[in-house]
């Protein structure tokens, strides 16, 4: 096959431009990234060889070799792992076939300190080689295949792929170092980098320096098998960087060994930064499963529930069979018990952290709260435990609150926990639906995460207090005692007879466009608002579903009018006097469109809305 010349995917080109121009303040971490990738490749082959031992024929001792060549100015990082096929080579090193690519690129700022964390979250460590190399070549052969391939690029937009008949199994990455980067050819420098960043790698990392004998320069012991007293915080941090392919600091570290009927070791990390693919539809978790130190998979759905998919780390079982398959994992009772133990430990750690007064739990909640709340909806057995961990914005100040604190602040006569859902916290605070609650000092939870629409409907109550939406028609404030000295009403209501006549006129004008028209208790300042009938889908949820083409059509809602508002009183008086002249009909449509706009919806008929608005303005100007 002749040489293939290809262009990098546009996203890769942009990424490389940032990397090449010294994105990283600490360039030595390119070696950590390449060694980490090589370790993963060996782990994957070890697992594949359980069912196909021939894949290891002639070379069953895994290792990662560092070979500096001062005369040629090159550094080679070689492994005898799984390797790549022709198509995998192009896909893995020429494109970023990952969810969140667009968001990732849009968030790159050009600020090195900020962008390094983003690139770490996105998991593209191979490209860090171009920080120190003017040219990178990869010679690889996939285990079980006879033909190898060579990939070469200078990182400036193109790469070539050619056959490599003499390629060994695995991959050999050769970096042609730039001028000024020759420190990475010195044996002492390579040893110090490996000791600092890769000592925990469970595969031997060897160094072949000129004529000297090849020597192993890392401990080559699985970190999770060591006693906690032997491990430094720095070693934990570097293992987190390796296993999570991340650059941030772990927010929390859990390392323990479960003994008894089932034995397993867990070394788990909660990140401090939110991964970019955390809300991807496949919702994969990223804890690696080992059996007796042999890597099995990093995509075991049964190991942790989806609402804990932000956790990173390893779990090593002594009780699962080495030849366990994905099908066996799906219904394995041992794995089910491990899962129960892991969830209990993680939730216990979060509870402990949530009780600290240092404010760090708020940082966790900002990053992963929306994910953890999925557990309220999905994990019936632990929903109460998860609710205790939840934090909420509310109309009570600007900070976060717990449900327990909310209940403690409930007013006399208040028998429910009130909520309102929407997309933006500031818009929610301005909602007319909150006016009556504010007037009586009733706190309302402000819910802006998509999952809030689902868990609230799945949880009947907390501390025997039901959750109730302020946007539902049944929100009853009459039982709630008003604050001392508060005025019950700042203006008289329209006379009952006039109000009833107006309501009938508005109903007649709007017809099936509304489900009902009624007088409102909740409004104190605004003229109108829309609410959902009891038991009906909320307007915010309907809007979300319509955005994904999952709603059958827009439902008619209840239009509430404020009997104390000057506009409503004036309209009621006009109707009673019999001088409508079509004005009430136009006013009814304008009031409905106003209520829709407040809810973030467009007028039902923009042209008619504009015509009516102009007519009202003309009448006001011309008398």
Image: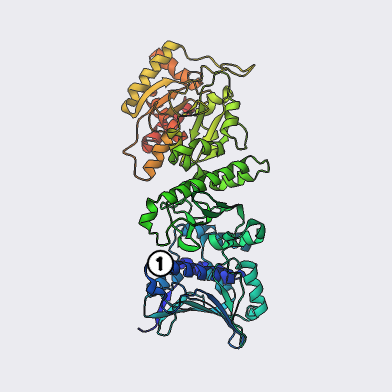
Residue 393 image offset from top left, x and y in percent: 57, 37
Q: Is residue 50 above or below residue 188?
A: above
308 in relation to 6, above or below? above
Instruction: Name above or below for residue 475 compared with residue 167.
Output: above
Answer above or below: position of 9 versus 169: above
**Could you classify mark 1 by the number of other residues whose Cα lies within 10 Å: few (under 14), some (14-19), or many (20 or more)?**
some
Horizontal side of residue 1 vs 267, given as left or right: left
Depth check, front residue: 404 or 616: 404
Q: Badge 1 is on which residue? A: 50
Q: Is residue 368 visible?
A: yes
Residue drawn 55% across the image and 18% down it? 413
Front-most of residues 508 and 192: 192
How many marks can you see? 1
Residue 148: x, y in percent? 40, 80
Q: Residue furthest front?
A: 261
Q: Position of residue 449 (x, y in %)?
A: 49, 41
Locate the N terminus and report the quarter of the image it occupies: bottom left
Q: Is residue 321 left or right of residue 551?
A: right
Name the spot of residue 27 as percent of width and height, x first.
Answer: 63, 70
Dot 1 falls on a residue whose secondary structure is helix
């Amino acid at each position: 096959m002749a040489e293939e010349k290809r262009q990098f995917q546009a996203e890769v080109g942009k990424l490389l431009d940032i990397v090449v121009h010294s994105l990283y303040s600490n360039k030595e971490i390119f070696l950590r990234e390449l060694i980490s990738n090589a370790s993963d490749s060996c782990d994957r082959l070890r697992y594949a060889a359980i069912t196909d031992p021939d894949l290891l024929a002639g070379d069953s001792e895994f290792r990662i070799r560092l070979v500096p060549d001062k005369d040629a100015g090159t550094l080679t990082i070689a492994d005898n792992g799984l390797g790549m096929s022709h198509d995998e080579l192009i896909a893995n090193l020429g494109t970023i076939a990952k969810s969140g690519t667009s968001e990732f690129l849009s968030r790159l700022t050009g600020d090195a300190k900020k962008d390094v964390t983003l690139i770490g979250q996105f998991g593209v460590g191979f490209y860090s080689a171009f920080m120190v190399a003017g040219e990178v070549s990869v010679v690889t052969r996939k285990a079980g295949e006879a033909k190898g391939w060579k990939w070469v690029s200078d990182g400036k937009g193109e790469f070539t792929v050619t056959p490599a008949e003499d390629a060994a199994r695995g991959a050999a990455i050769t970096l042609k170092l730039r001028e000024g980067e020759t420190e990475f050819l010195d044996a002492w420098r390579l040893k110090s980098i490996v000791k600092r960043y890769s000592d925990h790698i469970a595969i031997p990392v060897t160094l072949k320096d000129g004529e000297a004998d090849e020597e192993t320069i890392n401990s080559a012991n699985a970190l999770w098998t060591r006693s906690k007293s032997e491990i430094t915080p720095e070693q934990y941090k570097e293992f987190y960087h390796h296993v999570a392919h991340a650059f941030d600091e772990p927010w929390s570290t859990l390392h323990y060994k479960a003994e008894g009927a089932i034995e397993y070791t867990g070394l788990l990390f909660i990140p401090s930064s939110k991964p970019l693919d955390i809300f991807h539809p496949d919702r994969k978790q990223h804890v690696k499963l080992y059996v007796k130190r042999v890597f099995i998979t990093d995509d075991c759905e049964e190991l942790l529930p989806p609402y804990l998919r932000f956790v990173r780390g390893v779990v090593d079982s002594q009780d699962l069979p080495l030849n366990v398959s994905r099908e066996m994992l799906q219904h394995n009772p041992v794995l089910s018990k491990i899962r129960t133990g892991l969830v209990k430990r993680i939730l216990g750690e979060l509870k402990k952290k949530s009780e600290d007064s240092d404010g760090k739990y708020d940082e966790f909640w900002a990053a992963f709260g929306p994910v953890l709340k999925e557990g309220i909806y999905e994990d019936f057995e632990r929903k109460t435990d998860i609710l205790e961990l939840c934090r909420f914005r509310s109309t009570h100040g600007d900070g976060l609150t717990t449900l327990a604190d909310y209940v403690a602040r409930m007013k006399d006569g208040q028998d429910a926990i009130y909520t309102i859902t929407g997309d933006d916290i500031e818009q929610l605070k301005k909602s007319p639906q909150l006016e009556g609650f504010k007037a009586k000092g009733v706190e309302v939870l402000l819910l802006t995460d998509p999952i809030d629409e689902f868990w609230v409907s799945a949880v009947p109550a907390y501390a025997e207090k039901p959750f109730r939406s302020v946007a539902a028609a049944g929100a009853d404030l009459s039982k709630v005692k008003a604050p001392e000295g508060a005025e019950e009403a700042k203006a008289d209501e329209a006379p009952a007879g006039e109000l009833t006549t107006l309501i009938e006129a508005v109903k007649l004008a709007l017809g099936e466009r509304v489900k009902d028209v009624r007088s409102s208790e909740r409004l104190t300042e605004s003229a109108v608002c829309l609410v959902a009938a009891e038991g009906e889908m909320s307007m915010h949820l309907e809007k979300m579903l319509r955005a994904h083409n999952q709603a059958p059509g827009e439902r008619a809602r209840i239009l509430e009018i404020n009997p104390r508002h000057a506009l409503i009183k004036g309209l009621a008086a006009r109707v009673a006097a019999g001088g409508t002249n079509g004005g009430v009909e136009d006013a009814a449509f304008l009031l409905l469109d106003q209520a829709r706009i407040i809810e973030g919806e467009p007028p039902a008929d923009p042209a008619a809305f504009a015509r009516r608005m102009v007519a009202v303005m003309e009448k006001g100007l011309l008398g």
